[in-house]
Image (cartoon, grey):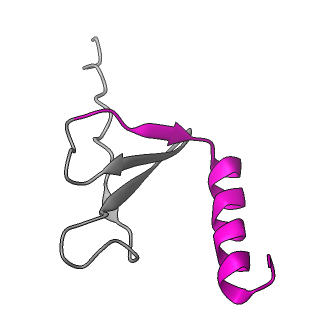
Amino acid sequence: MLAAPRTTAAPLWFKSSYSGGNTTECVEAAFVPSGVLVRDSKRPGHRHLKVSGAAWTSFLAAVCASRSGAGA
C-alpha cells in the first residue's frame, strides 16, 4: 500500500509586538524548520525574507542590547 504524500503545514505567522498599533509598520514572522520567515503584514501574498535561526538570534540579541543601552 502506498502512503499518501505528506503535506507541509503552512507557516504560522505572528505579528511583532512592536508593530505600529494603527496598522502601520506591521511586521510578521513565522518559525520554520530552516529558520524564520519575515514579511510585511499589509502584503502577505508578496515575497518574504528568510533568515537562519542563528541570524535571527543575533538580530534579537542586538535589538535587546541596543534597548538596554549595552550596545551604545
Residue 41, horizontal then vertical, whole percent = 25, 54
Q: Is residue 6 left or right of residue 31?
A: left
- Is residue 24 shown above or below 47? below
Q: Residue at x 40, y 55 (%)?
A: 29
What's the residue at 25%, 20% (across, down)? Answer: 4
Residue 7 belongs to magenta span: no
> In what quadrant of the picture does the N terminus appear?
top left
Residue found at the far top of this picture: 2
Observer-nearest residue: 58 or 34? 58
**Image quarter of the C terminus:** bottom right
The count of marks equals: 0
Residue visible at 29% across and 18% down in the picture = 3
Q: Where are the magenta residues, as a range?
A: 46-72
Q: Is residue 35 left or right of residue 31?
A: right
Query: Residue 66 appears at what percent x and percent y?
Result: 70, 77
Quadrant of res 8:
top left
61 inside magenta stretch? yes
Residue located at (81% from left, 83% from top): 70
**Residue 35 placed where, x, y %?**
56, 44
- Horizontal side of 48 relative to 32 (left or right) equals left
Q: Quadrant of residue 26?
A: bottom left
- Up the image or down, 6 lies above or below 30; here it is above
Question: Residue lying furthest bottom in this view?
Answer: 68
Of 12 and 55, which appears nearest the observer? 55
Quadrant of residue 62 within the rendered picture: bottom right
- In the rendering, at what x and y percent does residue 58 appear? 72, 58
Vertical comparison of 68 with 51: above or below: below
